[in-house]
Every structure is written in structure tokens, then in C-alpha cells.
């Protein structure tokens, strides 16, 4: 459903920020995207969204190529950026209604989704306030709500857990599971390994833009013949630069 094939991106530095990366997120899967600071996670996610252009490789979102069929690809994508400081001059409800118009979502359906999600995230009371006056976590929540209004086939979240309170983390994990269980694909980046371990069906670890692990925890445990934690695996892989996959 999300198909990333041999993508490469470099900025002005000599080395690639993302280097020949391939990964697939299938319908029904939650994919955890891990890696040390500067590994290339946000760059990859921005390539998926079309905010950055690919040097080479292809990305398809529900079979629509982000380069060749940009509008359709974006219609199938829900995106939560890592920094939530957007549309600060709008009220929460104005931002959500703006998205309703952009994605041409029927009003009744949209209102219902807003009500359901805002209630879950304890944001109903804040919808008439300006986003500028929101806390970091509230800004994150309004972006999460907005990213789901059009019921995207592929939901991509860049460090969504940062700044959320424990209740919101719980709700978000539930929403990711529900969204995947409806046959959609979910990919999120995080440094919170314990959450990744208990939320994700599969994980990929990258370093210097290169994939160093891609698989399911059960496979890892089997391969290493021990009950290894994701934290231990991560430390080992990112320290030694070894590809055990
Ligand atoms: N706009 C940019 N211009 C130039 N270099 C950039 C830009 N954005 C990212 N980079 C570089 O690309 C590399 C990958 O950065 P990226 O933000 O994708 O990493 P990340 O895995 O998301 O890191 P973190 O976990 O710290 O958020 C880094 O070396 C970074 O300095």
C-alpha cells in the first residue's frame, strides 16, 4: 500500500541523507521507522509526502506515484509532521474545516469525525481557540485529528508521540491499530522503542540513510536465539553498523 523503492536523496552535503532505501508497508500493518538522530527518517517521510523531491527511486501511495500522480497520491495520504507549528492564526475548527474543503469531505461525515476524534483527545473545548494559543501537545493533537479527516489509505506520522500526554499516547496507539485493522497502512517514526515494540507489526531501522534492519520482532528474537528487547537490538545495530537482516 506504501511502496518505497530504491529512494535516494542528498542535500548539499556529499553523503546521501537517504541512500537506496526500499520498504513496503502492507494493508493492515503498523510500521515503526527507527534510527538515531540524523539517520534520515524525516527526510524519508518528507519524500513520501512530496514536500521534498526524490533524486532517484519511486514512492507509490495506494499505487499512485508521488511524482507522476501527485494529487491522487496525496489524496490517499494522511501526514502528521514532527513540528506542529502550522496555521497558528487559525482556530482549531477553522483549520479542520479548511482541510474538509481541501479534501472535499462531505460536511456531515467530517463533523462526525471531528466530534469523535476531538472527544477522544479531549480537544472539543479547544476547537474555538486559536492554534497559536495551544500547547505543544494540543497542536500535535489537532494535526493528528486533521490528518485522519479524509480517512487516508496511508497514514504517516513523524515522531507523533513527542509532547503527547500518556492519555493521548494511549488514544493515538489505539487509533493507529484501528486504522491499520481497517486495511490501511500506518508508518510512524519514533525514538520510543518500548512503544514501537508493543505497537508495531514490523520495524525498520536506518542509519546514515541506509536500512540496517527490516523485519518483525518475533523474527529478530528467533534469529538471535534469545528474548532480546528492541532497545538492545537498536543499540547493537546502531553501534556496530552491522546488518543482521
Ligand atoms: N533541509 C535540510 N538541508 C540540509 N540537510 C538536511 C536537511 N534536512 C535534513 N538534513 C540532513 O539530512 C540528514 C538526515 O536528517 P533527518 O532530519 O532526515 O534525520 P532524522 O532521522 O529525522 O533525525 P532525528 O531523529 O534527529 O529527527 C542529516 O544529516 C541532516 O543534517
Image (cartoon, rainbow, N blue to C red):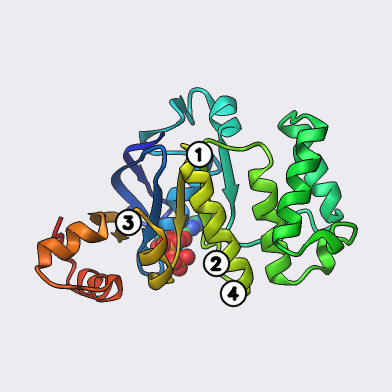
Query: Is the residue marked by circle 3 packed among few (<14), some (14-19), or many (20+) residues within 10 Å?
Result: many
Which residue position holds label 2? 161
Question: Label 3: which residue?
Answer: 203
Q: Is residue 112 above or below residue 105?
A: below
Question: In which image quadrant can residue 121 be found?
Answer: bottom right
The C terminus sits in image quarter: bottom left
Most distant residue in the right direction: 128
Task: Judge left or right: residue 9 versus residue 136.
Answer: left
Image depth: mark 1 or mark 4 in front: 1
Report the mark closest to the observer, 3 or 4.
Answer: 4
Comparing labels 4 and 2, the label whose residue is closer to the camera: 4
State the residue in front, 95 or 124. 124
10 Å crowding of disc 2: few (<14), some (14-19), many (20+): many
Q: Residues within 10 Å of mark 1 (few under 14, many from 20)?
A: few
Dot 1 or dot 4: first in sequence order is 4
What is the quadrant of the N terminus in the image? top left
Q: Which residue is denoted by mark 1 in the rendering?
A: 182
| Circle nearer the N terminus (3, 2) | 2
Quick one: SS at disc 3? strand
**In front: label 2 or label 1:** 1
Amino acid at each position: 500500500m506504501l511502496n518505497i523503492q530504491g529512494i535516494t536523496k542528498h542535500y548539499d552535503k556529499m553523503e546521501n541523507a537517504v541512500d537506496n532505501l526500499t520498504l513496503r508497508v502492507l494493508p493492515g500493518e503498523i510500521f515503526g521507522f527507527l534510527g538515531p538522530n540524523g539517520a534520515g527518517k524525516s527526510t524519508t517521510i518528507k519524500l513520501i509526502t512530496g514536500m521534498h523531491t526524490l533524486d532517484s527511486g519511486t514512492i507509490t501511495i495506494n499505487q499512485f506515484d508521488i511524482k507522476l500522480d501527485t494529487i491522487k497520491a496525496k489524496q490517499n495520504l494522511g501526514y502528521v509532521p514532527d513540528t506542529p507549528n502550522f496555521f497558528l492564526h487559525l482556530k482549531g475548527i477553522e483549520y479542520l474545516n479548511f482541510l474538509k474543503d481541501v479534501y472535499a469531505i462531505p460536511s456531515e461525515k467530517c463533523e462526525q469525525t471531528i466530534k469523535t476524534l476531538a472527544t477522544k483527545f479531549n480537544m472539543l473545548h479547544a476547537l474555538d481557540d486559536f492554534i497559536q494559543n495551544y500547547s505543544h501537545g494540543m497542536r500535535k493533537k489537532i494535526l493528528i485529528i486533521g490528518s485522519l479527516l479524509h480517512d487516508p489509505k496511508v497514514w504517516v506520522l513523524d515522531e507523533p508521540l513527542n509532547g503527547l500526554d500518556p492519555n493521548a499516547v494511549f488514544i493515538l496507539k489505539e487509533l493507529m491499530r484501528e486504522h491499520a485493522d481497517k486495511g490501511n497502512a500506518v508508518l510512524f517514526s519514533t525514538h520510543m522503542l518500548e512503544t514501537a515494540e508493543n505497537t508495531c507489526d514490523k520495524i525498520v531501522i536506518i542509519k546514515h540513510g541506509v536500512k540496517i534492519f527490516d523485519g518483525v520482532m518475533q523474527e529478530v528474537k528467533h534469529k538471535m536465539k534469545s528474548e532480546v528487547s528492541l532497545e538492545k537490538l537498536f543499540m547493537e545495530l546502531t553501534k556496530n553498523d552491522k546488518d543482521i537482516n
